[in-house]
Image (cartoon, helix red, strand yellow):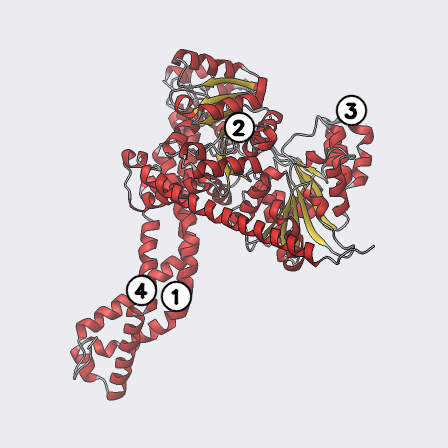
Amino acid sequence: MGLFGNNPDYAKVEESRNTIMFIDNELKKIKDSEAKANRTVRAALDTFVFDELKEILMNVDVEEVNRDKDGIRTSLLRNAGIKNVWQLENLSVNQLTMVRGIGEQMARKIRENSDKIAENAHKSLHIKLTMDDKTPEADTLIRALYISRKLPPLRKAAKQYYDTAHETITNAYVLSEPATGRMKWFMANSQKKQTAKDMVSSIDLLLYGSFGEKSRELIDLFGKVTNPPRNIYREDFEKNAADYFALLEKVSQGQVDNKGTLYGLPEEMAKKVESVELNLTGLKCSLRSYQMFGVQYILAQGNVLLGDEMGLGKTVQAIAAMVSVRNAGATHFVVICPASVIENWCRELKKHSDLVPVKLHGNTLMTGVDEWKEKGGVLVTNYESLGKVELEPEFKVAMMVVDEAHYVKNPQAQRTKNLLDIRKNVERVLFMTGTPLENRVDEMQFLIGCLQPEIAGKIENLKSLSDAPLFRETIAPVYFRRTREAVLTELPELTEAEEWCELTLPEKQAYYSAVVRESFVDMRQVSWKFDEYSVENSSKTTRLLELCERAADEGRKVIVFSFFVKTIEKVMASLGDRCIGPITGAITPEKRQELVDEFTAAEAGKVLVAQIQAGGTGLNIQAASVVVLCEPQLKPSIENQAISRAYRMGQVRNVLVYRLLCEDTVDEQIVKMLEEKQRIFDSFADESVAAKESLEVDEKTQKAIMEMEQERVRKEQEEADNKAKEKEWQDLQAKYDEPEKTD
């Protein structure tokens, strides 16, 4: 820097000192930002709650203060223009006595009764924060939560930098002071001058080295995070609502978290569950308090059946339980699920944890078990392939998760026998099903018998009392079920899930043909576009039927969207008489509305099938709370419009959106391309709706995807041909190596 010749460049020295102290102070501010962020959230929440409470009390008639017939003459209040309890809450006793006919005693009684009403309303108030709420109070709360949610990694980095350099910076700042002014330099002895020179050099090394560069980047990022544009924090809230409500639970004092009133366990058992300590190091997602309690229940009770309703995150709870068990020293886990969701489980494990999935299905049947035995991790397989798993008697599996456990309700079925065989090697078993079992007591009893036989014996004589408190209390140690309406008190959520399917052989052949023919349209209809169409040959159809069955069990209705008429025809054929529709571009708007009205009036379990361009705009379909997209769309706005048909004002259930996707196909490429475009848009675009609408897989991108798929398929086929030739040669060689037979 050349700050020293015969004399220092005092101005530059002072600038460096001020800059390094600014960095030091900013790092401390970031490091210690948690308390302020929490206070900001708490203040925003109080304001939001106040506004919600005001809305409630404005709708409580003034007559309510005389509900207990305390002799309060509410007509006098009405004559004075006081019509609701909110108005009363803003009046003191003295102000009430100014109303003609009301004395001090009556005024105090009015004040007392009004306060009771307000207190009860406040206790029963639950946060109803949604994207539809455009009030300043909601906006301020979402913004405060966004900032609080984004700060932890910044605080961690700031602490590291601050702890590394703070002492050096403080000493350098003090000891470099002689170099800040002519008189100070003149008065300093040679030793202090040398020390000052050394300290200025230390400051410059920090400022212009890696520390200074990274610290400035962190400070700049902190500034952006704490001053976010409105579109950024609202979009983040829309995508990560669960994390926002998890954060709210920590500061809401029961206004979001209903813990203790929801779970329905006997008090002693609930205390035992709550006392379980979890080590969730390696879990990559936030848990809601009810999910945390679910994980504690799983670990406290050992062998259990988790029956939470669809959409409450049973998979995440299972993963969190495995993470906690792993952190206690365990190494081997098993997940058993229908073949259609094996890939989904593998993706969820990678997405939400650092657990390593090992797939045992299809091509990995031979190598999967050996790899898992040697290295550990989570063996993910289906019921049928489980029969290929042979474990030595002494081999221990720390935990086995059985998804869609009602699949093993038949004790004579081979899949059930496979499960019970491996059960002998397992220390903990978690059965999971979103299907309500309360009305299928025999099935419930068998499943419970696989977990805790003594409890299955106890309920033998209670089968006719399945709705009675005694029955629920008896099964509480092994069966735990919560509904969305009981747990998610914060209004409907939009839950989106990617359902990854593995191609069957006929699908793969049809898909390869489409790639060779360069038919992008046929490629997009993967799993639906082949001549010998049948349910068992279509991985997407198989998963669609499973989702529709589960929705029917939970009293839900489904809307299925596809871009392609041929796909819609096959969906209709697969679902049969449960279908209503289809809504396509070929029918009139009047007919479309008639179909929606029919769907609205229909019983639970019905499925409305619609072409996404026709059913995705202009219709209100709140009757559906499950949305299935048969293929990814080339414009996200098309999907968003379709989803908004069900996820809108008037929807009383949380909306579950499932995207049917096939791995190693154009589906995967389209999803990746759109995610990349979205990331770039989020980084550089403003709030322009037109810019948002421009997000799409255009012709240029389609061409790039086509070329990538052609290259991938070419390599796969080349590899398959080489393997076939190698096997042919080995067979031929083996034939000639056989000794000649002699008479």
User: Residue visible at 40% across and 51% down?
Assistant: 36
- The reply to whether dot 2 and dot 4 touch (C-beta < 8 Å) is no
Q: Which mark is residue 430?
A: none
Identify which residue, 16 or 80, lies in the foreground.
16
| Closer to viewer: mark 3 or mark 1 | 3
- Identify residue type, mark 3: Ser
Q: Secondary structure at mark 1?
A: helix
* N-term-proximal mark, 1 vs 2: 1
Identify which residue, 206 or 106, lies in the foreground.
206
> Circle 4 is placed at which residue position?
213
**Could you say where residue 122 lies in the image, as x and y percent from the top left?**
49, 32
Could you tell me how far apart the alpha carbons at marks 1 and 2 are, in whole angstroms? 66 Å
Could you tell me how far apart the alpha carbons at marks 4 and 1 are, in whole angstroms? 14 Å
> Circle 3 is placed at which residue position?
464
User: Residue visible at 74% across and 27% down?
Assistant: 466
* N-term-proximal mark, 3 vs 1: 1
* N-term-proximal mark, 4 vs 1: 1
Could you tell me how far apart the alpha carbons at marks 2 and 4 are, in whole angstroms? 61 Å
- Identify residue type, mark 4: Glu
Q: Secondary structure at mark 2?
A: loop
> Circle 1 is placed at which residue position?
162
The quarter of the picture where residue 743 lies is bottom right
Q: Secondary structure at mark 4?
A: helix
> Circle 2 is placed at which residue position?
531
